[in-house]
Every structure is written in structure tokens, then in C-alpha cells.
Image (cartoon, rainbow, N blue to C red):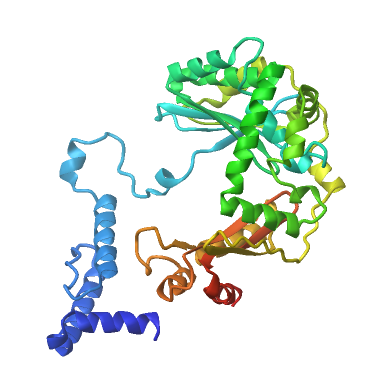
Amino acid sequence: MTIKQLLSLARRLSKPSFSFNISRSSSSAASRLAAAATSDSAEISPPPPTAMIYDRLSLSVKSKLQKLENPDPRFLKYGSPHPAVVSHTHMLSSPETKITTLPNGLRVATESTLSSRTATVGVWIDAGSRFETEETNGTAHFLEHMIFKGTERRSARDLEEEIENMGGHLNAYTSREQTTYYAKVMDKDLFKALDILADILQNSKFEEHRIRRERDVILREMEEVEGQTEEVIFDHLHSTAFQYTPLGRTILGPADNVKTITKGHLLNYIQTHYTAPRMVIAASGAVKHEEIVEQVEKLFTKLSSDPTTASQLVVKEPATFTGSEVRMINDDIPLAQFAVAFEGASWTDPDSIALMVMQAILGSWSKNAGGGKHMGSELAQRVGINEIAESMMAFNTNYKDTGLFGVYAVAKVRLLPVPIIFVMV
């Protein structure tokens, strides 16, 4: 049965004793609505009670939009002296992105929303686990932890108190291709936040006793991650899809590497990868582009200008997709977790847009989430209605030269073949 047939059946079942008359009245109501729509002066009549909820909502929205585009003159009398705005498109569009490249290769990008009272500023660096070796795998993540442990100007406690006194938020994350440090603050504290970011990236001390302490923290974090099955699945997925290439390595690295990382490794990683041409300083909200550029020129003066870019490093060690399979058996886990992936698209590949749309079409669903079984995509509805999985989600991961596209699902062991067939079909 098609969707149209289901909707038609639902309309008839809403009042079964008057199905014939309702059908006729709905038709006549539709005719009246069509006639009213052709007249500029005619007002939109209320939808018939037999109309489905989506039909009623659509007509209601159209009516409100018509009133916005043709406002009552009585309101304009006491309103703004500026002419009425007929098109609201520009109100919904994003602010202009301004980009400036400094002489050392550092790029500054901003999007200004001057009506905002808050701002976000961050440093995005083309440096992640992909640019490590087997021996240094885990250094990028270790460095992310150590970067907040004190500088020549600020102790770790000073950093915490300064951010807390602003009422701000300072954080960082590491991925396979990027490391990011960012702050969210009020507009008046924007330059202070930028100064803190410049300080931790250029003047961190990396004291030995703090390295030892943070090593234990990271080892405990690794134990926690091992208990997060989704994280484990995607690590195995990368390791088998990109076998014997840097992209197949984990972000945290092996425990043996974490136990042997030293201050020298951290300093060498910064010197090699935290270079100006591989950085973008981005700010949005209550920011002015010229002011941000001026502050960046003053604060970020110690960065290396090594012209080597991450893209050049990727060309030397490209990721090669290998169709393969890996299975991990753990009888202590009641549910089976699986992911099936195909080679996706890079960030700059035109197909990346199509894959984003496809990801949205496939959607996601979880038995524990609200909304019911009929609120998701067609695939999600099949999974939910037939109870063939506990949850599912489509994923689309992009990298500089490749990507992964697929579906991740959690199901009962005896039902595992069914969601696999649904996904593949």
C-alpha cells in the first residue's frame, strides 16, 4: 500500500459514518480554497475538519506568511520608518564569512553577528593521529591534555580561574586529521580568550610531574573508551578499512606508546605540526573581522612558518580503502553491534554533498528515543516497526582524500542477519 493510499484511508476512517459526504465536502472545500488562492484580496478560509494535520498546518503557515508579506497598515503607522520587507530570505541566510591570510600563512576567518552578546573563537589545526608514526601514535591526543596544564605566564589554576571568572567555556578535541582548541565567552572577554589560546599554544611548559600525572589520566580514559562499544566498533572499522595506513590508527594510540611519551615528543610534535600554514583561527558571534585580525597578528608571533601543508603530507602517505571484515566476539555483551561501510568521499569531492543528503534520507532511530516508530526515515521505520534492531544510524565521515559512508546498528544476536540485509538492500 502506497503512502497516498494510507493517507486516503486515514481520512475515510476519521469519520466512517459520513465517508461519502465527507469526501464530497472535502472536494468542495478544496475547490473553494483554490478559488480563494487565485484572488489577491480573498482571505484564506480555514481548512476543513477532515483535512489531515499536515494539511491544516500547511494552510496555517501559508496564511501567516501572507500576513507578513502584506502587513496591516494600522501596524505600519506605529512601526519602523523603513519600508516593509517583502522578502525574508536574507533574514534566514548566514552571515558573510570573511577570510584573511597573514604573511606567515595563518588564516583568520570570521562570521559577525553583532546583535549577539556572545562569541566563540577557536584554533583549528591540521594535525591529528593521521600525521603520527607507529611509534608516536597517541601524541596528538596526549598534547591536547597537556596544553591546559600551565604556561610561562599562567599556571593551570590561573587558566581555570580566568575562564571561570569570565563565565566562559574552554575546551579541545582531537580527531584523526584535526586538533581544535576553542573558547566560548561574552563579547567583552573575546580578546582575553584569544590571548589565552595564543598563550597555551605557544608557551606551554609541559612539566615532567604533570606529564606523569596526565599519563595516568589518559590510561584510565582508554579503559573507559574500551567499554564504549560504539567507539570500539568505529576504531576497528577504520583499522580494517584503511589497513597499514596512518588513517587506520586510533586517536588515543596504544597503551605502550602512552606510557613512553615524553616532553621531547610533545615539543617535537608542536614544532612539526603546529605551524601557521596549517592553522585557521575562526571566530563567530559578536566579533569584528578587522579587530580579530589585528589581535591575531599581535598574539600569534611564535608560530613556525614551515610551508608544508597537511595535504602535501597526505599525498606522501595516502589512505587506501580495503574491502574487508573484522569480527570481535564478546559473550558478556547481550547485543550485537555492527557497522557496514563503503568508501566515501573526501571533503572536497562533489559527491560529499550527495552523501550528506543520503545520510539524512537513511536517518537514525533508537528504541530508547521518543517520537515513536513512525517519526524517522523509511529505513528507520522498517527497523522500528519490524523490531529488527534496538537502534541504527547512518554515518558519513569525510577526510582529506577519502571517507567512510555506511550504517551502524545494534541488534539482538539472533536477529543480526536481518538488519544487515535491510541495510544492504
Q: Residue furthest front?
A: 332
Question: x and y percent of residue 3 in the render?
Answer: 38, 80
Q: Is residue 279 left or right of residue 244?
A: left
Q: Is 216 rendered above or below residue 159? A: below
Number of labels in the image equals 0
Residue located at (15% from left, 43% from top): 74
Is residue 137 something that shows in the picture?
yes
Q: Nearer the viewer, residue 207 or 316?
A: 207
Q: Residue furthest right?
A: 316
Residue located at (29% from left, 55% from top): 65
Question: x and y percent of residue 344 in the render?
Answer: 68, 60
Q: Nearer the viewer, residue 331 or 291?
A: 331
Q: Is residue 148 left or right of residue 381?
A: right
Quarter placement of the C terminus: bottom right
Quarter placement of the N terminus: bottom left
Is residue 409 something that shows in the picture?
no
Q: Is residue 66 left or right of residue 110?
A: left
Q: Residue furthest bottom?
A: 20
Question: x and y percent of residue 412 in the render?
Answer: 51, 69
Q: Nearer the viewer, residue 53 or 328?
A: 328
Question: x and y percent of residue 366 in the render?
Answer: 44, 61
- Please identify the quarter of the rendering in which residue 405 is found: bottom right
